[in-house]
Image (cartoon, helix red, strand yellow):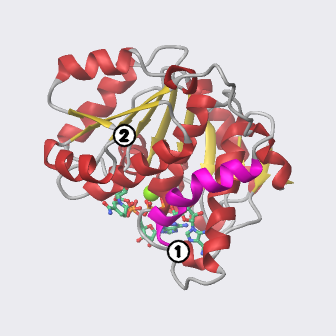
């Protein structure tokens, strides 16, 4: 297992002068039912602040006013408007599904719809409710090598069948080999598994144990993959920076609000740019 260090942030490059919003990727986020609207709003905030060029959110229409008020940079689509969903998804570079999605019939239909829509060049990040739904169903991933799962230990137990107490590197890696997707296994020391390597994040703190911290990480990973190389190094950088910023905030905050991590992203990305 390799321990991540600050060097992993070297993927954050100075932006070219002749760039425009199209240069930094189109990201589509899907989630947020009537109960969990906050989750997709937090993912959106992270994604936009992480630098995704264009961000569109497919969510329950009850969330639209709050989303617009909080993040006018993001566009929103009613998840019942299939025609508009089709056109938005067709142009996406990165798709994130799951934060606050819920696990009812509608949520399951949306996950199946995304599996049918994904093309070979689109990265798909599967988080939160979408992991639990995938674990319950029997659908195959369309493009495993272009898929990232971001489970916490309980979601990983559901997905892999490995009890939390038995989630060792060797056993986790064996399940990764079966799934073929990249796994971001979140805990107080998050681990990342791809088909060749395992990495451990040494940063993070208990102030992060607040609902929404994982929704924020998922949005950051999406925003990073939208603009930086499609590689595990980009995912590592998002995981490391998320905890790095949280550790900065924890120096004088007992609780680290997820939205504060997002708000600090542009500042720290500027500090670390190469
Ligand atoms: N403001 C919001 O709208 C929020 C919505 N959320 C959404 O709620 C849905 C359900 O997700 P939850 O994760 O709450 O529910 P889950 O039922 O999937 O898992 C939560 C439980 O797992 C257990 N657990 C064991 N190890 C853990 C670990 N390392 N990290 C976290 N939990 C661990 C904990 O006891 C915890 O109560 C997701 O779609 C999620 O995105 C949550 O993110 C909370 C905030
Ligand atoms: N004690 C802790 N130390 C370090 N990181 C933590 C701690 N508790 C939670 N985290 C981090 O917070 C995030 C929680 O993710 P998750 O459980 O999916 O939250 P949510 O779904 O509520 O947004 C993960 O990135 C995890 O690594
Ligand atoms: Mg979560």
Which x, y percent locates residue 152? 53, 59
Which of discs 1 and 2 lies nearer the camera? The answer is 2
The numbered mark, 1 or 2, whose residue comes first in the sequence reads: 2
Which residue sits furthest front? Answer: 17
Which of the 4 quarters of the picture holds residue 20?
top right
Query: For mark 2, what is the residue?
Result: 73
Q: Is residue 172 visible?
A: no
The residue shown at (58%, 54%) is 265
Magenta portion: prevailing SS class: helix
Which of the 4 quarters of the picture holds residue 195?
top right
Which x, y percent locates residue 145? 62, 25
Depth check, front residue: 112 or 137: 112
* Distance (Cα) linking label 1 and label 2: 24 Å
Task: Give the structural element (helix, strand or loop) at label 1.
Answer: loop
The residue shown at (15%, 42%) is 61
Q: Is residue 187 magenta?
A: no
């Amino acid at each position: 297992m390799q321990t991540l260090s600050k060097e992993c942030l070297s993927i954050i490059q100075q932006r070219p002068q002749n760039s425009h919003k199209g240069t930094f990727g189109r990201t589509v986020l899907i989630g947020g039912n009537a109960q969990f609207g906050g989750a997709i709003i937090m993912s959106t905030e992270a994604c936009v602040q992480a630098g995704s060029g264009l961000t569109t959110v497919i969510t329950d229409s009850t969330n639209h006013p709050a989303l617009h008020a909080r993040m006018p940079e993001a566009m929103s689509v009613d998840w019942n408007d299939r025609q508009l969903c089709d056109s938005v998804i067709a142009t996406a570079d990165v798709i994130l599904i799951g934060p606050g999605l819920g696990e009812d019939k509608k949520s399951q239909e949306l996950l199946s719809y995304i599996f049918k829509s994904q093309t070979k060049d689109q990265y798909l990040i599967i988080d939160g409710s979408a992991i639990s739904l995938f674990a319950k169903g029997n659908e195959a991933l369309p493009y495993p090598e272009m898929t990232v799962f971001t489970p916490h230990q309980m979601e990983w137990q559901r997905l892999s069948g490995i009890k939390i107490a038995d989630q060792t590197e060797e056993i986790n890696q064996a399940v990764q080999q079966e799934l073929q997707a990249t796994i971001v296994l979140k805990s107080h020391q998050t681990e990342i598994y791809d088909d060749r390597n395992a990495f451990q994040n040494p940063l993070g703190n208990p102030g992060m144990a607040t609902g929404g911290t994982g929704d924020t990480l998922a949005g950051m990973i999406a925003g990073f993959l939208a603009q930086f190389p499609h590689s595990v190094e980009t995912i590592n950088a998002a995981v490391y920076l998320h905890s790095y910023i949280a550790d900065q905030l924890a120096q004088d905050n007992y609780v680290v609000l997820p939205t504060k991590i997002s708000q600090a992203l542009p500042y720290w990305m500027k500090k670390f740019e190469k």
